[in-house]
Image: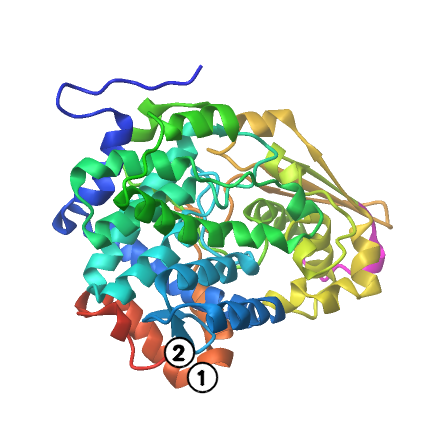
Amino acid sequence: MPDTPQAAPGAGDYLDQLARFVGLTPEEDIPEAVLARTREILLDSFPVLACGMRTPELMALSDKQVASAAPGKSWVIGKGCTTNRLDAAMLNGIAGAWLDYDEGNFLANGHPGMQVIPAALAVGQELGRSGRSVLATIALAYEVVARIGMATKIKLIINPHGTFGVVGAALATARLTGMPAHQLRNLASLAASSCMATNRHTMLDGATVRNWYAGHSGFMGQMAARLAESGFSGPSDGVNTTFSLVLGDGFSGAKAIEGLGQRWLLMEGYLKLYPTARYVHSAIDAFFDAVAKAARRIEPEEVVRIDVSAYRLAAYLANQQPKDWFGTRFSIPFAVATLLVGGRNGLEAFSDTAVADPRVMALAAKVFVTEDESYSATYPADQRVTLVMHLNDGSALRGQCHITSGEPTRPHKTEDLERKYLDLAEPIWGRQRAGQLRDAILTIDTCGDVSQLVSFYP
């Protein structure tokens, strides 16, 4: 049953607490470790977003959108122009999700960062807010998105982009625009009633409309704030209704506020080293564990069959023959095959060129993924995957993953994240400007106006 608990007298209900947490928490009450992690997420997001903006579809969309849109001071990152804050947030959100290389959070059932960063940055730039203010807003709004996601038993068919994030983007907008406290709860309810009816089949079908969902969060979150400012009202509890009855099979308000302000889910997220759905990374880790035991290079022709046992959400990504680069993001068989064949790294390993490689596709057809219910039972605390690679000499290599690399208890090496940043940023900005941008983001607290974060764009 839906759970809408009553808080202590005077404290407001769970939804009021979440809304006021974003709108009213003083910057100085946010732990420095949380702000430091927020800077890391922002730094990781910029080149991911810019690379997405350089793809043919985003270039075409941004050309059309900017040409017909009102002007503004908000960056369209990677394009080299500015526009109004609604369109900038929408375009940046789509671009940030495009390559599936962005930050995420297992506990939150999604990608809170890319749901709130585009809106917070766009609003902050349009209004000339300080870097410290925008950074604090991102941290607070991320937390609410993550907590609503954690408290929801989301339906398997639902893709989380464009759902929880609408609430976070709306509250981020409210904080930066100075919305009165008495309007915040209504705004959260109204925003939750403006989510998309998303679906995971877009991933399996390689349908890039899925990436629009993240753009919806940044755009509709701001629209929700505009509606509330104009006198529109939401239902009595839009969050509970939407996430317990429409997009989910249950929602706990008590869970959403448990430890609020003390436990920061933002600290428990991950950054990616591969441009794939997060669940694929668990299988990649198991694959590398198996290969390491061989103590030699395994040639694709040696492989007879590869069996992967995984938790439910990973087992869902069992497509052996993705049709294009976007479909590769959601295919464990393809990921294992392209990494075993080798010769490509990063984005190239999950490109149309890799899809056209007959060795990769032949090997992907030999990879079989099934759910192990005992693994599903311990998810998300554990992300267990086992992989068995059967070779033509009769031997078998076994690998496993319990905690996916990049989780807080198994962090990536600093040099690996630095390499990702440079690999993505240098082709767009050049080495010197990429370095300047990195330094500007890491010292964003000292920036008095984020519209002048650096003296250049894209």
Q: Quadrant of the C terminus?
A: bottom left
Q: Is residue 211 left or right of residue 35?
A: right
Residue at 37%, 71% (x, y): give it: 71
Label 1: how many Cα within 10 Å (few below 14, some 14–19, many 20+): few
Quadrant for residue 357, please give it. bottom right
- The residue positioned 61% from the left and 53% from the top of the image is 209
Which quadrant holds residue 5? top left
Measured from the top left, where is residue 86 in percent x and y?
Answer: 39, 59
Please give the residue where the numbered disc 2 appears in the rendered image.
Answer: 434
Indicate whether 306 appears above or below 379. below
Q: How is the image coloured?
A: rainbow
Q: Could you say which is closer to the camera, residue 208 or residue 99?
A: 208
Look at the numbered discs 2 and 1 and tell me whether their residues touch, using CB distance below 8 Å: yes
Q: Which residues are magenta?
A: 295-305
Question: Does residue 21 appear in the picture of this structure?
Answer: yes
What residue is drawn where x is 26% and y is 57%?
135
- Viewer-side residue, 54 vs 236: 236
Instruction: Please say whether residue 248 is visible from this viewpoint.
Output: no
Q: Is residue 250 left or right of residue 178?
A: right
Q: Position of residue 167 (x, y in %)?
A: 36, 41
Disc assigned to residue 430 = 1
Point out the image quarter for the N terminus: top left
Q: Which amino acid, mark 1? A: Gly
Regarding mark 1 in the picture, which secondary structure is present there?
helix
Q: CA distance from mark 2 to mark 1?
A: 6 Å
Picture coordinates of residue 149, whole percent (x, y) = 42, 35
Disc 2: CA contacts within 10 A as few (<14), some (14-19) or many (>=20): some
Question: Where is residue 55 drawn, in percent x and y?
Answer: 59, 70
Disc ID at residue 406: none
Q: Amino acid at mark 2?
A: Ala
Q: Is residue 57 above or below residue 34?
A: below
